[in-house]
Structure formats: C-alpha cells, structure tokens
Amino acid sequence: MTDEQEPDYRFTLANERTYLAYLRTSLACYAGGLSAVQFLDLGPARWPARIIGVVLVTAGIVTTAGAFRRWQLNLAAMRTGASLPVTRLPLMLGATIATVGLIALLLSLWR
C-alpha cells in the first residue's frame, strides 16, 4: 500500500476547478433540456422536444455523477502518486450535445 501524501495545493485547486466546470456544464444541460421541452416549437407533436429535453437532462445527471467520481479518483491518484485515471466523460458530453444539436437543427429546418 502506498502512503498518501498531501498533493501540491495548485493541483488540488485545479482538480476542484475542473469539477466545478463539469457542474456548470451539467447545469447548462438541465437548463437546455427544460427549455427544449418548454419552448422548442416543432409543430403540434411535442414528442421531439420532450425527447431532446430528456436526453439533455439525463446528460446533466450523468455529468454531475461522473464529475464527482472523476474528482474523487483524481484526488486519490494525486495523493498516492499514481497516474490520473482516464475518463470518457468529455467524449460522452461532446457526442451527446453535438447529436442533440444536430437533431434539433434538422427538426427545425424540416418543420
């Protein structure tokens, strides 16, 4: 077992800033999802807006949970001197937001 050491405070603060950035992103997903359901006018059928809203709010929930887990794993790695763990959270976020944006754009143009 490796002894834990207090990491340089700059790395700890950078880890916290990254965590807070993910939380801001998750809040944007929540707001975008709720706004899509409320304001996206795609005609009489409301299901496209609801699907977009559900996907964005779900992405926000996954981002919130993933950000906390990433913060924990990074802090543990810094304390033990291990390599920082690999994460797929940015890829998931980018792919989800790009896909939802493209679908919303296509539905808006199709209308």
Image: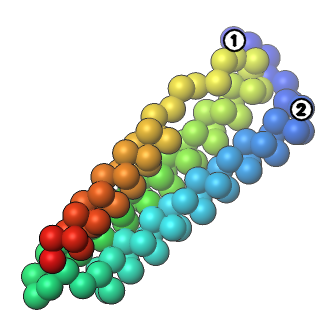
Closer to the N terminus: mark 2 or mark 1?
1
Residue 75, percent across and down? 71, 34
Where is the N terminus found, in terms of image quarters?
Answer: top right
How packed is label 1: few (under 14 Cα within 10 Å), some, or many (20 or more)? Answer: few
4 on left or right of 93 = right
Residue 41, percent across and down? 24, 84
Q: Select label 2 or label 1 by which is in front.
A: 2
Give the quarter of the image for residue 55: bottom left
6 on left or right of 33 = right
**Which residue, as the protein is rendered here, is positioned at the far left?**
45
Q: Residue at x 30, y 57 (%)?
A: 102
Residue type, numbered disc 1: Met
17 on left or right of 45 = right
Where is the C terminus found, in terms of image quarters?
Answer: bottom left
Residue 68, above or below 74:
below
Q: Is residue 48 visible?
A: yes
Residue 99, percent across and down? 31, 52
Q: Secondary structure at mark 2?
A: loop
Residue 28, percent across and down? 51, 67
Looking at the image, which is closer to me, 81 or 28?
28
Looking at the image, which is closer to me, 47 or 69?
47
Q: Provide the residue designation for mark 1.
A: 1
Q: Residue at x 79, y 23 (%)?
A: 4
Whole-Å distance between the Cαs marked 2 and 1?
A: 21 Å
Q: Secondary structure at mark 1?
A: loop
Q: Provide the residue designation for mark 2.
A: 8
